[in-house]
Amino acid sequence: MENWPMSDTVEMLQAILSTIDEGIHVVDANGMTIFYNHVAAKLDGLTPEEVLGKPLLEVFPSLDRHSSTLLRVIENGEPIYDQPQTYTNWRGLRVETVNTTLPVRVGSRLVGAVEAAKDIGKLRELSERLIELQAQVNKPKRARRQETDGAVFQFEDIVTQDEAMRQMIQRARRASSTSSPVLIYGETGTGKELFVQSIHHASRRNGRPFIAQNCAALPSSLLESILFGTTKGSFTGADDRPGLFELANGGSLFLDELNSMPLDLQAKLLRVLQDGQVRRIGSMKAKQVDVRIMAATNEPPQQAVERGVLRADLYYRINVVSFEIPPLRERRADIPLLSRHFLAKYNRLFETKVGGFDEAVSRMFQTYDWPGNVRELEHVIEAALNVVEGKQLCLEHLPDYLIERGRKVQGERTAEALAGEGAALIDAQQVVGSRKLRDVLQETEEMMIEAALAQTEGNILQAAKLLGIPRQTLQYKLSQRSSTTQ
């Protein structure tokens, strides 16, 4: 690239920045926009022509030198990471992003700043709606439990005949009577939330809130505000809002995929566990909360600690009551039971009358490893009932990847059967080569007659009934054998 013309180099850099799926906004040292990609334009509801070559504050009049992350970086030369920012463009459109903003230097001279922005407006709106719904659901008690606490499952809903699972359920019932933290490990789809909802339902907190949050579903800055709440003015556009800890007060908070939570948030969670107090973002005041924390990981927690994605101190604090839910492939006796359960469930929902599974489907279900566990099995049966026409669920009704798997299993069994028939034929040939059929039949007949007479203590009539032949026939055969021996 040393011999390339400067204009070509600039065009190439612009092309690269234009392909990035984040909003890229570059300003010079005077706050004038010198690069603005199409993603940034879409986020801001503008066109590049409306922004390029213009002062930043002219295009975004709701910002000032303090609230603009780009202008703050130009002023102090320090980078800003994952900073929420809410602003309004000159058309009056409200925009909400999370920004990472870096200074641009040529040698030691600061010449501008570059910002990468992600749109979190819609995500925050959905999350805040969720919080509002949780707040309304958790108002004074209503007649039905599921209308108040959000936990709809109980231990009776866990379908299993596996002994290890049954013992685990008994342990969980005993743990329901305490408020100790719970940590559950299980692969995706094993039913971790069903398990923790059952613990909450069986506890003294069953009339209080049960709130679940997946820690991998939200970016770090948004997850923090969702968990701990916000104070008006803590960042641009922030309102006074309670977090999930406050909403779950008196009840249980389930944090799924805890190993995906950023480490700095894990430290804040540890403080809440230790002192039972939560502080909203931007507030100096702490609030006392009574929340039972239940968490889950989709990898062995000790392995997560070793990989550095789960703080060791948090692990030791939260791993008071622990359960490891076995994958479906390790409890294959549950597969027919669960299959019938889901078939009945979707027969009711879809108003169908599928009676069962043909032999090929049952055989394939038992040999398949189910990487998606119980959730995958349920979705496979649901999908099949969308296309089945007869009274039986057959191989051709399953998703394509399982149809191929089922045909492979059928082929293996056919090969085994043919091999067995071949072995039997070889044995028969060996017998034919050494003995006559008449001799074998006669010996077998004599053995059966002797056994029948022994069982009936010599009673010929009863022995004939056991053998399924007339009494006269048996007497004749006995007389023939007697004359032969003489």
Image (cartoon, rainbow, N blue to C red):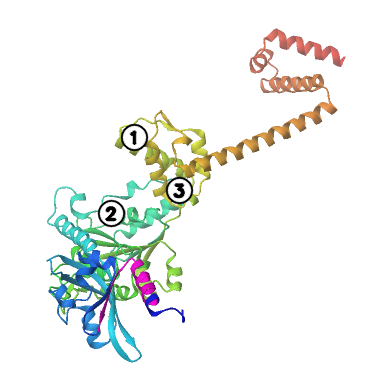
First in sequence: mark 2 or mark 1?
A: 2
* Residue 202: assigned label: 2
Residue at point 79% right, 29% down? 429
Quarter of the image for residue 204 reads bottom left
Q: Could you give the CA–CA distance between mark 3 and mark 1, rounded to whole angstroms?
A: 25 Å
Residue furthest top in the image: 472
**Residue 117 falls inside the magenta stretch:** no
Q: Which mark is residue 162?
A: 3
Q: Earlier in the sequence, mark 2 or mark 3?
A: 3
* Mark 3 vs 1, N-terminal side: 3
Q: Quadrant of residue 185?
A: bottom left
| Spatial CA span between label 2 and label 3 | 21 Å
Taking the view exactly as shown, the residue that stands out farthest to the bottom is: 108
Which residue is under mark 1? 347
Q: Position of residue 325 (x, y in %)?
A: 42, 56
Judged left or right of residue 348, residue 277 is: left
Is residue 445 placed above or below 242 in the rendered structure? Answer: above
Is 316 placed above or below 109 here?
above
In magenta stretch: residue 15: yes
The answer to whether residue 145 shows anywhere in this view is no
* Mark 2 → mark 1, Cα distance in angstroms: 29 Å
Residue 433: where, in percent of width, then height? 84, 28
- Tag shown at residue 26: none
